[in-house]
Every structure is written in structure tokens, then in C-alpha cells.
Image (cartoon, grey):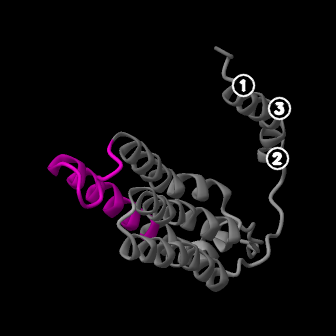
Amino acid sequence: MAPPTRPIAALLCLWLLAPDARARADAPPRDEPEPKVGWATVGGALTAIVPLAIGSSIIASTEDVGRRRAGSVTIAAGLALAPIVSHLAAREWTRAAIFGAIPVACFAGMVALLEVQPTADVYGTRSGRLTYGLVLSFGVLSAGLGIIDTLGAARRTAERRPRLLIRSPP
């Protein structure tokens, strides 16, 4: 059995990039341009809606277990990427990680569930169908909240800008 190289490579990349992130955190604040909140929100919404439409049409059009599984994974992948795309377009890197964590976990849960029980969407056991519905519901809700949170990006950017305070002499 070969040792797992992907996790080691990922940790190595994080270790190499971490000093650069700390150096940038100590840098003086710079004047950031206003994020394009509308485009970021539309991009995130489209990232969720297009795979949702494609995946649900795949699920509705076939009885083949493999294709239904592919449709479910397509839906979950789009929902996982939507808040990440939305926040990255608004240049909010940390919020992309925070609001993308739950949808990505739901995507991983969906993949794991369909590996264990490929027919969990319609023909599976009661607990499998319930888990499928809960994972999909949490994915939709958390992706939606992440996209909605992008609407506050302009306000947060304005709050981070340094302000010039002029005080009158006493």
C-alpha cells in the first residue's frame, strides 16, 4: 500500500504559503477598490443554480443509479462552490473559507452517503432518504446564506479603509 501523497503535498503547500500570509497581515492597510457586489452575488447564484438545474434534470430523466448519483453530486458540487465563488469575486478570502465550509461538508457527506447507499435519493432505506434530504437541505440553506452574505462586502470594505481624522485645535 502506497503512502498518501496528496495530504502531504497539501500540508507542504500550506506550510510554504503561511509565512507570506503572516507578512501580508503585518503590512499597512492599503486603499482597496470597491468590490463589485452585484457581480459577485450573481456569480455565486449562477454557480448554484446552473448545476442545480443540470443535476435535477439528470435525476428526473433517468432511472439509472449511476446517472442519478452523478446528478446528485452535480447539485451538491454547485452548492458547495457557490458561496466560495461569490466571496472570492468580492475579494473576501477569509469569508469564502468560512461560508464555504458547511456546503463543502455537505458535498462530502453527499458523496459519502451515495458511496454507501447509491439509491439513497429515492429507493434507499428510510434513514438513507432522510439523510439525503437533510444533507441537501443544509447545503441549499448554507449556500444561500453565503451568497446573501456577499451583499455586505462593500460595507465591510469601507469599514476596513483607513480614515483620515482631522481634529480641531482646542
27 vs 5: above or below: below
Looking at the image, tell me whether mark 1 or mark 3 is earlier in sequence order: 1
Residue drawn at (43%, 77%) of the image: 57
Q: Residue at x 48, y 60 (%)?
A: 70
Q: Secondary structure at mark 3?
A: helix
Front residue of this view, candidates 144 and 160: 144
Callout in the foreground (1, 3): 1
The answer to which quarter of the image holds residue 4 is top right
- Tell me where residue 150 appears, x and y as whole percent: 56, 72
Q: What is the C-alpha distance between the residues marked 2 and 3?
A: 14 Å
By secondary structure, the bulk of the magenta-drawn segment is best described as helix
Q: Which amino acid does the dot numbered 3 rest on? A: Leu
Residue 41 vs residue 70: left or right? Answer: right
Picture residue at 32% right of the left edge, 63% below the top: 137
Tell me if residue 130 is in the magenta stretch. yes
Q: Which residue is mark 1?
A: 5
Indicate whether 87 appears above or below 131.
below
Q: Amino acid at mark 1?
A: Thr
The mark that comes first in sequence, 2 or 3, is 3
Up/down of 132 relative to 143, above or below: above
Q: Secondary structure at mark 1?
A: loop
- Kindly indicate the quadrant of the structure image that contains residue 162: bottom right
Residue at coordinates 35% horizontally, 66% vertically from top-left? 63
Q: How many marks?
A: 3
As displayed, is residue 69 above or below residue 156?
above
The residues colored magenta run 117-144
The three-letter code of the residue at mark 2 reads: Arg
Residue 44 placed where, x, y %?
A: 58, 74
**Spatial CA span between label 2 and label 1:** 29 Å
